[in-house]
Amino acid sequence: MGYLNGFGVVIKKWIGVKSDTGARITTQYPEETRPKPERFHGRHVLNRYEDGMEKCIGCELCAGVCPAKCIYVRGQDNDPENPTSPGERFGFVYEINYLRCIHCDLCVEACPTEAITETKLFEFAFTNRADAIYTKDELLVDDSGHPQQLPWENWSGGFDPAQDSSGWMRATAPSGDADFVGIVAWAGELGYGVRDPQRASIEDESGPVPAGAHHDHAAHDHAAQDHGEHGDADHADPTEPESTETESTPATKTPGHFDSTADLPEKKRRFGK
């Protein structure tokens, strides 16, 4: 009888019988939009400090951790008279190829200065490949902490940093273990945001242990240091000859290495390989 009930629903719709008194669940997009999840990953932005200086120090950690190899960064020394960032270096070139980006957020977690974060903007379409490669001028926020609104992006309804930014980051312990207890939402990072201190955690077979239940590692570290100072000589093998040879191997460039003295390649060819 189940299939007969299905036909009954269809017939009621045809003749206009309204048996469903609940609200519609269909969102009339794009006139209506739904609130985005707290951890939504969208388009990136490069942030500034309160005094307007850039947070990026050109360390290239984001480019190194990126699994899609979509980030290209070149650092340059700051001008002592007119520095761009508080550090010794700043991001002279910063580009993201959104034809490759998978929005994994690893670049955000790797950044030591919280210079790069992600907004919740995902509605952008390109008419050519060059527009898909965002430059530093397009990624850098303005003086008020708001991102640049490009012609191919849908910023309908304006931008609210408290709602449309995706500053949530995974709270990670110094050992690298994720702490999923008491996750803190961090949504005010655009421009002048500050993140709460991360909580440490220890996980074993019984599950995660609260942050306040850590054991003291000082005695363990002290014992390990004493062992390194006194124990290595005692346990050395007297029959093994000491090696006095020193060999030097030529330095090899990694695939992501760029020579700071070389000319800048063309933007369109930078991500060609």
Image: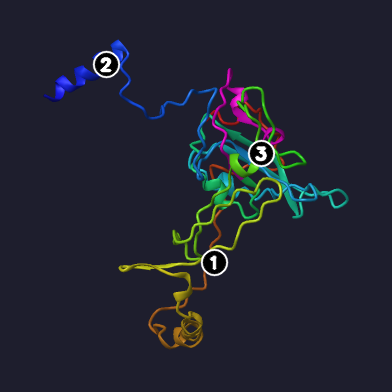
Q: What's the residue type where badge 3 is placed?
A: Tyr
- Can you say whether 16 is above or below 212 in the image? above
Q: What's the residue type where badge 2 is placed?
A: Lys
Residue 167: say if magenta: no
Callout 3: SS: strand
- Report the residue at 67% width, 26% height from top: 150
Q: Which mark is residue 246?
A: 1
Q: What's the residue type where badge 1 is placed?
A: Thr
Callout 1: SS: loop
- Nearest to N terminus: mark 1 or mark 3: 3
Marks 1/3: CA distance?
40 Å
Residue 124: say if magenta: yes
Q: Which residues are magenta?
A: 117-140
Callout 2: SS: helix
Find disc 3 in the rendering and name its residue.
94
Give the quadrant of the N terminus: top left
Q: Which mark is residue 12?
A: 2
Q: Which mark is residue 216?
A: none
- Which of label 2 and label 3 is nearer to you? 2
Front residue (pair 204, 175): 204
- Report the residue at 48% width, 37% height from top: 102
Residue 220 at x, y = what percent?
46, 82
Residue 73 at x, y = what percent?
64, 41
- Can you say whether 159 is above or below 236 in the image? above
- Nearest to N terminus: mark 2 or mark 3: 2
Marks 2/3: CA distance?
59 Å
- Which of label 1 and label 3 is nearer to you? 3
- Nearest to N terminus: mark 2 or mark 1: 2
Residue 153 at x, y = what percent?
61, 26
Front residue (pair 180, 46): 180
